[in-house]
Amino acid sequence: MEKDRIVLLTGWLRKLSDVVHIVIALSLIISAVFFLVSAFTNLKSINSNSISHLINEILFVLIIMEIFVTVITYLREHRITFQPFLVVGIIASVRKILTIEAHLSVAEDVGREVFFRSMIDLGVNTGIVFILVLSFYLLAKSQGPSECAGCLGIEKATKKFEELLNEKKGQ
């Protein structure tokens, strides 16, 4: 009897979780559209500063859309994959690199300290991109035909939990 109540309660909580995820997905789409329209509306002239700002905004929209895809995947399959988070990290780091480069190219007088900090920031972000791309590659390479190496699915977690319980009973 107690197990039936727990199953019923978790079923309702899962439905509530789905509703929250749907609201999040809709919010992400609305935000992406808003930022995209705003980016093109604010493009008043064609110069290097406005183009770099436009690219920055477009990359931000791309990050939002990758998170949206992750939420949709969760709603469909009730699992989370690591690949979209790696893609978001790569896009965010590339966005930061482009932003730094744009600021350095537009600035008339860059002091030694600002230049030095910018070069460190560029180096760190380039390293992050390299590590994330390597992680993405290794994760994609390690996937077998029936197993998703980068997934934390409910079925996978349940199976692992059952294996641990059976192991415990056997001891």
Image (tube, grey):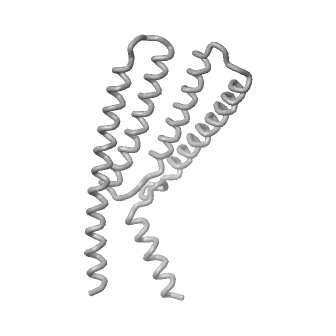
Q: Position of residue 142 (x, y in %)?
A: 53, 52
Q: What quarter of the picture does the N terminus occupy? A: bottom left
Q: Position of residue 104 (x, y in %)?
A: 61, 20
Q: State the residue at coordinates (30%, 85%).
A: 2
Q: State the residue at coordinates (31%, 33%).
A: 33
From this viewpoint, which residue is outermost toward the top? Answer: 46
Above or below — where is 96 with respect to 18? Answer: above
> Hey, which quadrant is residue 148 in on the image?
bottom left
Q: State the residue at coordinates (41%, 55%).
A: 80
Q: State the residue at coordinates (40%, 70%).
A: 158
Above or below — where is 95 with respect to 106? Answer: below
> Hey, which quadrant is residue 26 in on the image?
top left
Closer to us: 51 or 80: 51
Closer to us: 145 or 160: 160
Q: What quarter of the picture does the C terminus occupy? A: bottom right
Above or below — where is 64 with respect to 77? Answer: above
Q: Position of residue 133 (x, y in %)?
A: 56, 40
Report the side of 51 relative to 131 (left or right).
Answer: left
